[in-house]
Amino acid sequence: VTTYWCELAWLGGAEPEAGVVVEVEGERIASVEPGAPVPPPGSRRLDGLTLPGFANAHSHAFQRALRGRTHSGPGDFWSWREAMYELASGLEPDAYFALARATYGEMALAGITCVGEFHYLHHGPGGVLYDDPNEMGRALTAAAREAGIRITLLDACYLHGGVGVEPQGAQLRFADRDVDSWAARFGDLAGTDGARIGAAIHSVRAVDPASARVVAEAAAGRPLHAHVSEQRAENEACLDAFGVTPTELLEDVGALSDRFTAIHATHLGERDAELLRPATCCLCPTTERDLGDGIAQASRLRSAGITLSLGSDSHSVIDVFEEARAVELDERLEAEQRGRNAAHELLLAATANGHVCLGWPDAGRVAPGALADLVTVGLDSARLAGTEREAAIASVVFAASAADVRSVIAGGREVVRDGAHVALDVASELSASIEAAWS
Ligand SMILES: [Zn+2]
């Protein structure tokens, strides 16, 4: 048993609790007791504000190598996609492992203890299958383990380069021959202690309705994710081809349930939000703003009974505080009104909600029985100095950066100490693996 004393801890309400003693037994929290003004003898001090571990519910790890290379200049999602294809065309499993380990290391430094990896870079160049057709997926789960975080590998079915279009170029690496080939490969994936398996329908662009139905059936009992209405052009193509919105199509094929997560959900129609309940919508505001996608209607989705989670998606930055506040601040710009998503609601999206949509309902809370993920944010940086203790939740959500994360414990194991990863030199691994990915 390890005993931690948190100067402040967020236990789910609008305000933090002071002097919280957390006992950890193995990988789980055994007890949580607020109201201890001084650390008990033998306990470890966590100075600052301690939060549950963050879940990054939507990641494409390889896209970390695009950071800084695609942000300036004209274009939109579709021109960005060309740069992404160029990167994807060259990566092999060893290089991908190194890049993913470094990227997950950056996530750990940012307080992320679980990642949802929406995995579609499956096959070798030209679409040639590796000896183990899941070699890339297994590289990702191994990378997460070495970085000290948990993963839900969401293996994405991808069959078409667009509605009714054969895959070509880099898309051949994403595509299985048909949905039965995808299902066979998916069926061969097994979870471990730190890795759970889910499925994904890449999008209604890449998976036809009959195949989407097979994916939904194969995902029974597990998380099922899909990119939904990120682009107006996607809605238009779907309406033209099938006469329904992407959400209606997914409803028709039996994909929607409380295990379903719609990624982006930027351009939903009136009926779409009703259909999605009680699913999750995973917003990725830093990517959506980078790509000029548009702004999801977070408060409208929440009032329709939809759960929100957060993802860093293309990793233009990896900073959960930035994702969380962007949900509210982007909506303020559009609505010309403040205070539509409270700070503690945004933290819920970053923690418990994200874990639920990744199939880890036993994580994301500082509570007895939960996995022992403790993220401590220092309140003494230039950004956060002067924080009022009662208002620490709002201070952190609206002003902290990933660099303020001082300590991370994931599943009872220390991953970050004094702001540094205990096992990896993350910056030099990123530098080397990104250079290798482009060479
Ligand atoms: Zn995505």
Image: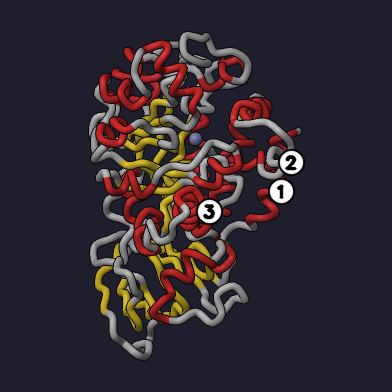
Residue annotated with mark 2: 435
- Is residue 70 something that shows in the picture? yes
Which residue corresponds to the image point at 36% horizontal and 63% vertical from the top-left?
344
Position of residue 181 measured from the top left corner of the image (x, y, whole percent): 40, 15
The answer to which quarter of the image holds residue 21 is bottom left
Circle 3 — which element?
Answer: helix
Residue 255: image location, x then y, percent: 28, 27
Q: SS class of the residue under badge 2?
A: helix
Q: Earlier in the sequence, mark 2 or mark 3?
A: 3
Q: Amino acid at mark 1?
A: Ser
Towards the viewer: 248 or 382: 248
**Residue where numbered disc 3 is placed:** 107
Mark 3 neighbour class, 10 Å CA radius: few under 14, some 14 to 19, many 20 or more: many
Give whichever of 73, 54 is nearer the camera.
Answer: 73
**Pointer 1: what residue?**
431
Mark 1 touching mark 2, by CB under 8 A? yes
Amino acid on which the number 3 mark rests in the picture: Met
Report the front residue among 355 and 289.
289
Q: Position of residue 434 (x, y in %)?
A: 69, 42
Q: Quadrant of residue 216?
A: top left
Query: Looking at the figure, which quarter contains the N terminus?
Result: bottom left
Q: Callout 1: few (<14), some (14-19), or many (20+) C-alpha neighbours within 10 Å?
A: few
Residue at 58 percent across and 47 percent down: it is 103
Please indicate whether residue 34 sits to the left or right of residue 161 in the image. left
- Judge left or right: residue 66 versus residue 195: right
The residue positioned 41% from the left and 76% from the top of the image is 391
- Position of the C terminus, as image quadrant, is top right
First of labels 3, 1 by sequence position: 3
Label 2 vs label 3: CA separation?
19 Å
